[in-house]
Image (cartoon, rainbow, N blue to C red):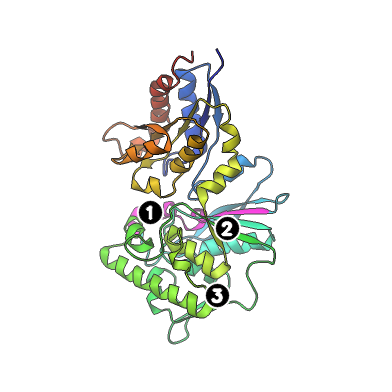
Amino acid sequence: MPRPKVVIAPDSFKGTLSSIDAAAAIQRGLRRACPSAEAVPIPVADGGEGSLAAFQAARTGRMEARRLRVAGPLGEPVEAAWGMDREAGLAVVEMAQASGLSLVREAERDPLQASTRGTGELLAEALRARPRRLVVCLGGSATVDGGAGMAQALGFRLLDRAGRELAPGGGALRGLVRIEPPSRPCVPEGCRVEAAFDVDSPLLGPGGAAAVFGPQKGATGEAVAVLEEGLARLARCWESDLGARGAAARPGAGAAGGLGAGLVAFLGAALVAGVELVLEAAGLAQALEGAALVVTGEGRIDSQTLRGKTVLGVARRARSAGVPVVVLAGRVEAGWEALRREGVVAALAASPAGAQGEALRRDAAWWLEETAARELGRFLGGAE
């Protein structure tokens, strides 16, 4: 009997496991459930946190890891990584490395003050390398400033009524009156900038950056209103001062606290679904050839999963190849059944009911391995 081929393509389990560690845990469980199976681990991501690692895993030996000390979300210095594949002319910047929510203690989270300046400093360094293609991975941000801090780091001036430079953070955007671009273009001629979004939200409105994601980053109801007003003012200045029309309404504009729209307006970026970029780089389509099963997963399966997250992207690729999909997640919330039409045959929680905090983070790999060992054998039928 031929060995069943199982493609293991998880995203990171935010705050607990990287995509590489998650793939390794699932592979250990698969080995216990079905020793004869051929495991093909492909750590992936959706354009959010963990995307840089996924690109590096896909381009082993070709993408050089570089590090730079930049301003963190609240101005404190942080060590951030970015990647450069010189042969391909490809630079990859992950905004969560410089402006991520994981860099801020929960009690200090405040999108009124948090800035994307550090992401702009990373971008300036990457652009100095003169890549032909620059991918900016969005998601996992502590910020709701529409990329204002990023723009300031790149030489744009964001001015109030008195002609003074705006302070950092989304709260200051209410005072924005005018944007002055730098004297020379930030992006070298011939370089394509791609903003890889992890959710397809617009910038403004009830489904936008402030309303949906502001509270997750520490914003109160009052703060959400302030952030919404500031982003609306920023969008008007994009149109009047930069000629960037319609940036706020594009799918993905609201990703990373509006950085998606900001990259379009300030740098002329193209907004693209991050999961598609990463899956293409990882070679998932080729790996699916001859596969009997795909195992994917992430920290939580919920309504956002259907807005462009990794699990959805993997499932759609697998469905096109006629391969069933099993999802292993830290938590599975009601509504996952909508994934059945994408070829998902089961979504299983890989943590015990009620588990939380440090104990859950410490034992996440063990629980994931145990769930894989317990469940995967039955989806492979009589493979042994």
| Nearer the observer, 67 or 45 | 45
Q: Which residue is mark 2?
A: 194
In contact (CB < 8 Å): disc 2 and disc 1: no
**Residues shaded magenta:** 90-108
Crowd band around label 1 with a 10 angstrom C-alpha radius: few (<14), some (14–19), many (20+): few
In contact (CB < 8 Å): disc 1 and disc 3: no
Q: Position of residue 255 (x, y in %)?
A: 44, 58
Structural distance between the alpha carbons of marks 1 and 3 = 29 Å
The residue located at (60%, 39%) in the rendering is 283
What amino acid is labelled 1 in the image?
Arg
Label tally: 3
> Hey, which quadrant is residue 298 in on the image?
top left
Looking at the image, the residue that sits furthest to the bottom is 162
Looking at the image, the residue that sits furthest to the right is 87
* Mark 1 or 3, nearer chain start: 1
Q: Position of residue 320 (x, y in %)?
A: 51, 37
What amino acid is labelled 3 in the image?
Phe
Label 3 sits on a secondary structure element that is loop
What amino acid is labelled 2 in the image?
Glu
Structural distance between the alpha carbons of marks 2 and 3 = 20 Å
> Hey, which quadrant is residue 203 in on the image?
bottom left
Q: Position of residue 146 (x, y in %)?
A: 45, 66
Residue 179, visible in the rendered structure: no
In contact (CB < 8 Å): disc 2 and disc 3: no
Q: Which residue is mark 1?
A: 105
The residue located at (41%, 55%) in the rendering is 104
The residue located at (34%, 44%) in the rendering is 302
Q: Which residue is mark 3?
A: 156
The residue located at (58%, 30%) in the rendering is 289
> Hey, which quadrant is residue 364 in on the image?
top left
Taking the magenta stretch, the answer to whether it contains residue 104 is: yes
